[in-house]
Amino acid sequence: MRLVYMMMFLLFAFIACEENVNQYAEIETEYNLFMIINTGNPYQAGIITKSYFGNGTDPNFNYVDPFVEDLQVRMWYEDTVKIFEPGLLTINQNTASESNIKVYEHNDCIIETNVAVELEVVLNEERRFRSYLLTPDTLQFIADLTDQILPPPEETHIIANWEGVSRQIIFLPRLKIWYRKTDFIDRYYYVPIAFTDYEGERIPVFSRGSAVTNISIPLTIVQQAMEDISAGDFRKSDYKIMKAFWEIAVFDENLSTYYAINVDAAEDFNVNLNSFRFSNVSGANGLFGAYHITTLPVRIDPDYIYSFGYVAGFPY
Amino acid sequence: MKGYCLRCFLVLGLLLIISFANKTILAQGIGSFRGVVTDSSNGEALAFANVYIEELSTGASSDTRGYFVITSLPANKTYRAIISYLGYRSKTVTFTIQSNKVTHIEIELSSASVELGVVQKIGQRVVEKNATDIGLQRISMRELESLPKGVETDIFRSLQYMPGVQTTGDVSAKFFVRGGASNQNLILLDKIPIYNPFHAIGLFSVIDPEMINNVEFFKGGFTAEYGGRLSSVLSINSKDGNQNRFAGNFSSSFLTAKALIEGPIPYGSFIISGRKSYSADILKKFLNDKNVPAEFYDLAFKVSFSNPNLIEGSKISAQGFFSHDDILNPSPFIEDYTLENNAFGFRWFQVGDVPLFFEIGVSVSTFDGELIPKFSGVRPKKNELSDVGLEMDFTYIFDSKDEIALGLHIHDIQTKLFLENSLGSTHDVGGKGTQISFYTKYKLLRYESLGIDIGNRFNLTRLKGSESAEYMFEPRISLTYRLHPLVALKAAAGLYQQEITTLSDDNELLSVFEPWFITPEYIEPARAVHYTAGIDYDMTETMKFSLESYYKKINSLPLLNEEKLFPNDPDLVSGEGESYGVEAQYCWLNQWVSFTLSYSRSWAYKILNGRRYYPKYDQRNSGSVLLELNLGKGWKVSSIWNYNSGLPFTKKAGFYDYASFTDYYSPWYTSFNSQPDPIFASKNLGRLPDYHRLDLSISKKIDLSFFSVEINASVINVYDRENIFYFNKDTGERVNMLPMIPTATIKVEL
């Protein structure tokens, strides 16, 4: 009987063992391009990376430099061609690899709105990537439906409306308050559309990008924002409130699609084993997109500023 | 055309009723024997009981209501019938058949737990020589209760041990039948469709097993009375309630507490059952120690009424079912869900002086589900479905034993599905329509060695889209040929159609909320063809071996458009499905021991844009060994060992740094971030290691003076096998299925 128990124990011990399985196939070399044009800005940059295998099963511990150098990167728009040169961006990066961000850059590449742009990357004689975009158009605020003074008289919300263009593009609006302290450094406070409480903390919630062509922020939230500017500081008069701005980021179609796919969070309890990534680069993965920022100043009523104990930057 | 067919049906139905309802003359020199088999302790119908007439070596099985009919018995003679049911004491009744009459007897069987040692079992082969039942599994509540309970008895989890039923792991109760998707299973509770049959993010079924009398599970090749789904039908019949005395039971597991009250009413009975979750701690074991803030309840009731003074031979019932799930996360950055089923039905079942049965039912079934994103960034979803049904079914049994059945099924279905598109605007992609179908079928049973069930389902209207004649007919055939007294050959074929689907992601192993909607007009209704063939070998009175093979092909299979980029891109794309396999089952059943050995070998494919891949539930080999022992004196032991070969998964062919930025108002490099993103190899070409698991359960029933207590202790995954569930796509972390979990339930019966 003892032998039977022993055999049963050994059998269970054997079959209970965890089995190893290789979750990796043969590596497929793929390239990834990432370049976002900031219209009106002379400095443009992009990156090109190559696929790799991580160190162990967790790719976040990766020591392989994914950046690809020594490629020819050309950009055409209107009657201009720009050759991008390799460069190094030493910014406060947050990447899985330990590499610096190696970019392809150009310091004199101002691209205006509503311009067709073509990007070509030559990998070698046989292989090249291409991508195209049309930079977004400038949007127009609808004056009658946009508050340009804060607080708007006899209203509970401050609102902005603008005219969208016909394409399926995304707008990302926000209201920011420009202020200074005694050091005269320009500071900005970004006004959320709501606050929520979680674990004793008040957390701001900002607008999501959408095709909706208006934004409305309750004045109670603006009031809370104004108070937050000097939260914990009793010297309210050290704060000089200058102005507010409506700021609308308009994306081109490529960036709109990328945003729509990437900004969606995954449902928390769903277990998804795959992910779909948008690419508008032929011959590689990645994104070639553009955006444009339109701003509209909003005057802040000095009396409203004084009500918080602040100083008005423009007391008229 | 459809108006003509509808008129034909109504005229035919009326003719049947008028022709037969008032007649007492069947044929000269013969008569019929009809009865209903019930449990003596509570009056509950005993489905699938055997009735065997010794003198004629013939018999029948009771249906799900406990009814049976044996026609064409020579008149003016006295017969002895043995009525048997596993776990009950067999009973012999003597009856005399009068010419042109139906002799009706009500038979009560006593449970073997009351009177031990005198139980007989008349083998299935004796009474069902030509039953056309390929692909059908019948499960009584007694069988369901004897399976290892796990956290608690669950009908869907019990199905997963059957050959031909696949899963994506032991975490979810979702099941896939013979290569079909889970939304292709029709779940009926007292013939009312239940659209979201899962509690607690799909871990358990919503149907409280305490309410179940019996279950019929059609794995394929189902006949013309069932429609609307492509793969399988799970028909759950609830109890009527104790007709003899007031009774109740209360039970508790690590997850739920539940109560059931039943009792007699004048000319009938009632039953009410309710269940509520009280702790979600056990659910952490299902999700890798992740907190699952799920709360749920369900409530079911049924009132049955049968007054011979009012309408002789009638049985009228009203039933309701309600379930509600909340998943409410304390964090404002994790979405909430609410899911609710409501179903109500009324049925009138009538038997006459002639072997004519008819049943008329009206039902309303609704499902409401909502994903409330709060500040999670998940897009909101809201789904409302209502299904108002009217069903009329008539069955007439000829003297020759042949049967004719016809029915009219009308379902008015309305779905609303509010989805927010990528541009932030909300659209309703639902629809509404009325599906009018009628079926006719003829069961040729006059030859002892041959049974043929041939019929057609006519779709007079479709829920949506054009009324092409192509989608009007769903012919079905099922046949049995008894080659030898012990051996039967069986086959079935049929065409099936489905016009309602869920928004389900093929890549999701677990999903909380899969909203229903009518298949949009840009996709043709999904159609499937089934071919099934098999052999039954009744080795002895208590041993049976069956072998079935199947082939299923699905056209216009609606699949989630994984490459949807723009709001105007369709949510669904049309694909194809194909599956085939072979299933074997060996059963040895007697009062003390139940042993079942199952094995299936199967293949399943989906085809999209010409690309063929294995769906997530494709299992090449699966098998189970089930052993139940009734040790007497209230002790029962059961064990089940389940084996599945590895499920498909998509291997990674490397990573690339997926660049992103968070501040869209500034140059991208000021908020640059990159994360390793997997490059997936060909879809589902990898295979996970084999799965196997042993569950054990022991229970003891203690009868006390005025109540009894049943204590059950179970161990899930006895040897703590680390079965892999999936690899986290982002980190590569291995996530396992259920570890070893000891559980217990206690049930007090009054």
Image (tube, coloured by chain):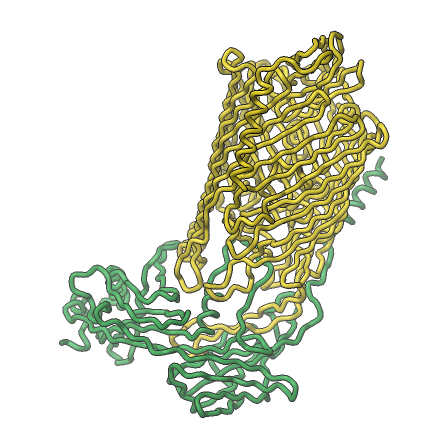
Please say if B319 is above or below A113.
above
Q: Which one is nearer the viewer's eye here, B129 or A62?
A: B129
Chain letter, yellow: B
Q: Residue A43 location, x and y as percent? A: 43, 87
Q: Quadrant of residue B162?
A: top right
Q: Which residue is depicted at the point 64% across and 21% down?
A: B67
Please say if B272 is above or below B531.
above
Q: Residue B122 location, x and y as percent? A: 77, 21
Q: Quadrant of the N terminus of chain A?
A: top right
Q: Which one is nearer the viewer's eye here, B304 or B442?
A: B442
Residue B491 can be seen in this image: yes
Instruction: From the viewer's perspective, tell me whether residue A210 is left or right of residue B506.
Output: left
Q: Which residue is depicted at the point 56% across and 57% down?
A: B560
Please say if A306 is above or below B473.
below
Chain letter, green: A
Q: Quadrant of residue B452?
A: top right
Q: Residue A169 location, x and y as percent? A: 41, 70
Instruction: From the viewer's perspective, tell me whether residue B688 is left or right of residue B508.
Output: right
Q: Quadrant of the C terminus of chain A?
A: bottom left
Q: Which residue is depicted at the point 54% across and 40% down?
A: B197
Please say if A153 is above or below B18.
below
Q: Residue B79 location, x and y as percent? A: 76, 10
